[in-house]
Amino acid sequence: MLMKKGIDHIGVGVGGVILNSAGKVFLAKRGRDARNESGKWEFPGGSVEFGELLKDALVREVLEEYGFTISVDLLLGVVDHILLREKQHWVSPTYLCRYVNGEPRILEPNKCDEIGWFAVDTIPVDKLSSASRDSLSCFRLHFAEKGELSL
């Protein structure tokens, strides 16, 4: 019997707060076939495969799901993604990333309904997935400590 990540055992996911040259962040709205939190906006990412480095998993997931390339700069934090109603438990490192090239597009239409670049102050916080809300807090804390962005 095949065991399911996040359900039969704790899953490892990885996410990225991706910045473009204009300082906007990339978000995707989870579709009806998403593994969890359908209809919520998120920082992209996905599950880590056995033997795969976290950063490599993130680069692969963004390319597979949205068709563009990123560079992974630094770890912002690790978030607990526990969804009691959906009976799922994930641990997800979140990285600060930079857009490199490619035209962002939805390559898995049932898993994603919408994508876009958002100014940090226009992120729909109340409509973010739980992991992405925590990732946003890590992002804001990082930049508040550095004094690079006023958030």
Image (tube, helix red, strand yellow):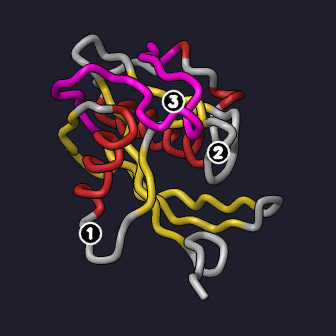
Residue at image coords 25%, 56%: 55
The residue lying toward the viewer, choosing from 78 and 98, is 98
User: Is residue 122 placed above or below 7 in the rendered structure?
Assistant: above
* Dots 1, 2 in contact, CB < 8 A: no
Upstream in sequence: badge 2 or badge 3:
3
Please tell me how crowded label 1 is: few (under 14), some (14-19), or many (20+) other residues with Cα within 10 Å.
Answer: few
Residue at image coords 34%, 76%: 50
Q: Going by the image, does 73 lie left or right of 46?
A: left
User: Of helix, strand and loop, which one carries label 2?
Assistant: loop
Please tell me how crowded label 2 is: few (under 14), some (14-19), or many (20+) other residues with Cα within 10 Å.
Answer: some
The residue lying toward the viewer, choosing from 119 and 26, is 26
| Quarter of the image with the N terminus in it | bottom right
Upstream in sequence: badge 3 or badge 1:
3
Camera-side mark, 2 or 3: 2
**Residue that badge 1 annotates:** 52
User: Of helix, strand and loop, which one carries label 3?
Assistant: strand
Name the amino acid, label 1: Glu
Residue at image coords 40%, 50%: 94
Q: Classify residue 57 by image quadrant.
A: bottom left
Q: Position of residue 13 (x, y in %)?
A: 46, 60
**Residue that badge 2 annotates:** 33
The residue lying toward the viewer, choosing from 108 and 117, is 108
Is residue 144 highlighted in magenta? no
User: Is residue 11 placed above or below 44 in the rendered structure?
Assistant: below
**Residue that badge 3 annotates:** 28
- Stretch in magenta: 96-121
Marks 3 and 1, how far apart in space?
A: 23 Å
* Dots 2, 3 in contact, CB < 8 A: no
User: Of helix, strand and loop, which one carries label 1?
Assistant: loop
Name the amino acid, label 2: Asp
Camera-side mark, 1 or 2: 2
Q: Position of residue 26 (x, y in %)?
A: 41, 25
